[in-house]
Amino acid sequence: MPPIISFESSQRPNSRAMGMAVRDLETKLVRHAAPTLAGMKPANLFTYRTANFTEEEASSAIAEISSRLAGFHLRVEPLANRARGVLLLVFRPKLVEGALSNEHARKLLTQSGFKDLSTEGVVSEIKRRIQAADASRAALDQTNCETAPAPKPEQFVPCCATGHHHDHGPNHVCQCRAKAALSREELETTQGESAFPHEIGLILGYPPADVAGFIALKGAGYLACGGWKAYSEPQSALETFQRNRRCTEEFQALYAQGAPLEALADTRSGAAVSIFDMARAAV
């Protein structure tokens, strides 16, 4: 497996391509990690697709963004290099610490073999397990050259547990076509590979009962689907999915209007605070 992209400052080229790489990563952060930027969520996970940039440009873009966000209590952690790009974890250490202090979360981590339950310890072990899972999958792919099976027919999640697929008004919390609208984070964490450390859901702010349910049922039998697969309190989960979507839409609009990434990441700023207050008011 190739090494994780490093953060060496000497690798930062001063070029138009570098500027494009930084802008591209900013756009992806706003699209895939807005709730974390706003302080509404401990962490977000997504793949930074780097096909349009050299490894040096992508590495430098991650380093620059990481440096710029550090002052806002945010970290950008590359977890693994993949064919499609770099798997990035964007998180607020203090919020992750709070999520991991939950009694049920700590019990699940202990049962899963985690020794160091600090934020650094859990992130480090998650990173190690993801890389091990990727290496195992790569070795399996190399030795198994059989034709891939035909894709399964498209399946849609029933709307609001009624079993019907129909349209609703814009304010209706609904899981119609949820399978087609899964977030990037959902796609990265719910593919069902047994070796993937699904305990990462605890870092991402998922309820421990939902993380435990996903692991036990291997992604089947969920009650609601959106940002993650919910196995407890589906209505609460659906409302959280909607708040996160609204936050993302608002942050994308603000960014498109010229708001700098730092303003969106500053929870004391008008942009972030307004989103946070909106989310709290919606509870």
Image (spheres, grey):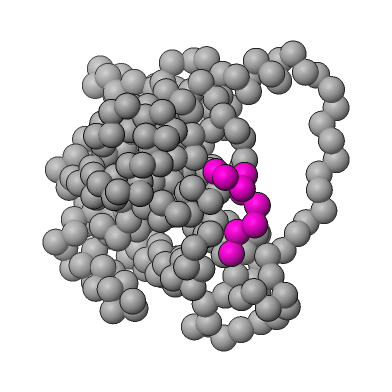
Asked whether residue 10 is drawn in magenta, I would say: no
Q: Which residues are magenta?
A: 215-223
Q: Residue at x 65, y 15 (%)?
A: 139
The quarter holding residue 273 reads bottom left
Asked if residue 152 shows in the view, the reply is: yes
Q: Please provide percent x and percent y for residue 85.
A: 51, 31
- Residue most extreme to the bottom: 169
Q: Please provide percent x and percent y for residue 125.
A: 37, 27
Q: Please provide percent x and percent y for residue 150.
A: 85, 40
Would residue 58 appear left or right of 272 to someone viewing this image?
A: right
Predominant SS of the magenta segment: loop
Q: Residue at x 43, y 46 (%)?
A: 201
Please name whichever residue, 50 or 120, is drawn nearer the observer in this view of the structure: 120
The quarter holding residue 175 reads bottom right
Q: Please provide percent x and percent y for residue 50.
A: 49, 32
Asked if residue 181 shows in the view, the reply is: no
